[in-house]
Image: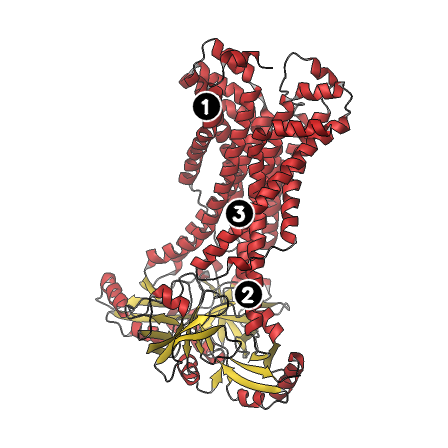
Amino acid sequence: MLKATLRSFLAHKGRLLLSALAVILSVAFVAGSLIFSDTVSRTFDRLFASTAADVTVSPKENLDESLPSGFTPTLPASLVDRAARVEGAEAARLDVDVEGITVADEDNESVGPTTGAPTIGTNWNPTDRSPVELTSGHAPEGADQVLIDADTADSKDVGIGDTLTVIAAPGSFKVEVVGIATFTTTNPGAALIFFDTPTAQTRLLGDADAATSISVDAAEGVSDPQLKQRVAAALGANTYDFRTADEQAESDVEQLGGFLDIIKYVMLGFAGVAVLVGVFLIVNTFSMLIAQRTRELGLLRALGADRRQVRRSVLTEAFLLGLVGASLGLATGIGLAIGLIELMGLLGMNIRSADMVIGWATPVSAYVVGLGVTFVAAYLPARRAAAVSPMAALADAEIAGVGRPLRMRAVVGTVVGALGAAALVGCATASKTSSSASLLGLGVLLTLIATVIAGPLLVRPVIRVLGGAFPALFGSIGRMSQRNALRNPRRTGATAAALMVGLALVGGMSVASASMTKSFDEQIDKTLGADFVVQNTNFVPFPREITEKVRDTEGVGLVVRSQLTTIAARFPDGDRVETTAAGYDPQLDEVANITYAQGDTATALADGHMAMDREFAQDHGVRVGSTVPVEFQGGRTAELTVAALTDQDSADGFGTQGGMYFGLGTLERYAPGGQESAVYVNAASGTSADDLRANLEETLDPYPQVQVRDLADYKELVRDQIAVLLYLVYALLGLAIVIAVLGVVNTLALSVVERTREIGLLRAIGLSRVQLRRMIRLESVVIAVFGAVLGLGLGLVWGVCTQQVLALQGMTALAIPWGTIVAVVIGSAVVGIVAALLPALRASRMNVLAAIAHE
């Protein structure tokens, strides 16, 4: 039996190749994502471990600092002297590191990264642990000299002697590049600008007596934990954060972890789609191969092979397919990881391919996925093969059975579909976002399973409709192509299912993104009343100097500032909610239209007052007049009075969770040092919008980090943010289509082999090669469009339910992108034509007499 299995596998290796490609793609994305994330993690582990001081003293973190508010926590620079006198401390030095500055060249173009990485201003204080070394020029001396890192200098064509403009929170100033510093370790992608320490303190922090952290080196024989304990005792254990080198490195890795997780999960998402779609392909391939080998399997049974041996034979073929696919997929995954590493290099993150890490978990995962996918997919066909009767060997020709009746599928599909529909109905009627989202996920899963199970039941009614015009348009050729697609509903359903999965995902996400876009457009139209908004492209705050320049611009009538901050509020129900809040100037009503359930803007922005969303307030037992303890960045606390409740639909965009906001006076009292997140501008009387825009753009030309946007521009910005998610979905669709095309090609190729004798007879009675190719192409088109119809129908239901979840967050508009849907259906027909090219060509080249004699 083993010899027979190996010979069968080698005899059908051409037919199995396309199935192996699905396994290869699945394994490649799994292996590539693991190798890439392990390599980057190991690289940065080494970087942070080698550069961290023995003990680092930093301001105490009371809130999540991931929101860029422009607030830079500091501690007194005088702590460095106290730390240096601690027993066991060899040396101590103060550090100044400020992210979010902007550096412009002489043409007012930013020299910072364009990938989202920060531009960091820091003091030049080199040690044997510094990640850079001075390679040309000299160290900065005085307020007008800086060093720049070599990677930024090369990419932005900056050299020694060039003049740059540094735009920081205290103000902008000119500097001269006097030296180049080269990374001795991995460059994380940021741009580094080095100042001497007094300049960094005064020009970046605006305080000559402040620093962002203190680094302490341990004397010989003193461990890091011992030094940490002594430094904490000397400086105040509860006043600042103290970390050893290992703890600091771990903290830095955690901050980077979010970025790495995004890449890893995106890659694993591609792997998941490849696995899911690949299962359909492999099931179909093995089902057809077994159907074609009915006589062979029957002969084996007649010669004495029992059912277990036949089933084991088919599963052994699947094992071999998975083994080959996993091995090739692992090699492909290594290549994919190298490509990702090179791509990161183009984006400024220089990781050496020679440092690539292949941990034990990577090959294990690769072979588990590869073997698991093929084994699971081949199990049902293997059971079917074991059921072949020995009498099948006596048949005159191999007969591709259509399988058992579809009654069981109808029952199971109906039950699962009913449960899925109930979950989706519950999602649409739920009043809480968390429960609605959970029901949505359950409903999507169950309805997808139900559609896959019941797909063959839908083949005959749907394809009769889709192919109904074929006889009229193409005559007998069209009729035969339609009947070929109807011949084996299981096969047609499984072939179409591969395409259906990808298109269902795209349909659902397209509806969701279109609804989000329409909702934001409506909310922007409803709430934004300013002529222009001055804002950073990446929503990073900008210095108040820019606001003053805007205020002094000719034609400006009204300027309203906005700042974002992180707060933690404790409510009467006991919940502590950490969220983003906003601060506004008193003239907010002049640039925004907010509907209040109680109170008004004047009371909301008064000193010591705040506003929040009405429904959020009800959920937490808050009413107008309630006092809410609020903790701000930097550790200050305040008891704020709730003076106004808003309607979230109209307040959305002026806050996040809870829609909380207050006056800038309140914010600046409890969290000073923040920067503007946006500035709303109205034209003065007698100044046209076009004139004001031209004046503002001229004023802001020296500040490359901000742009002037009107209502249409602001909408486009929001659309661009939503489009990023949609691009990912389209990439997943592309992968699903590639594997789906492989599935259609595989199905048609095996179908042609299965129908060899039939094709020979058709050719013998006058069917031309052109007509034969057309028949196969039409069969492929109707199968592909069938998959598209099922997928888009399912996707539309998912999309509408997703919009109901979004409606609970204030995004109430529903939009269905009919243009996208029509384009996808047309594209599916094209996919069907492309997939049929090779099988149709092969069928048309058959020798007629040999085909008739085929058994």
Which residue position is annotated with label 3? 802
Q: Which mark is residue 841?
A: 1
- Whichever of callouts 3 and 2 sits on the residue coming sooner in the sequence is 2
Neighbour class for label 2 at 10 Å: few (<14), some, many (≥20)? many
Q: Position of residue 86 (x, y in %)?
A: 61, 89
Q: CA distance from mark 1 to mark 3?
A: 44 Å
Q: Report the front residue among 649 and 740.
A: 740
Of badges 1 and 3, the one in the foreground is: 1
Query: Residue shown at 65%/54% (left/top)?
Result: 360
The local secondary structure at tag 2 comes to: helix
Q: Position of residue 493 (x, y in %)?
A: 57, 29
- Whichever of callouts 1 and 3 sits on the residue coming sooner in the sequence is 3
Say if residue 188 shows up in the picture: yes
Q: In which quadrant of the rendered image does the C terminus lie?
A: top right
Residue 312: quadrant of the picture: top right
The kind of residue tagged 2 is: Phe
Q: In which quadrant of the rendered image does the N terminus lie?
A: top right
Left/right placement of residue 337 relative to residue 532 reads right
Residue 760, above or below 13: above
Neighbour class for label 3 at 10 Å: few (<14), some, many (≥20)? many
The kind of residue tagged 1 is: Leu
Of badges 3 and 2, the one in the foreground is: 2
Left/right placement of residue 750 relative to residue 113 reads right
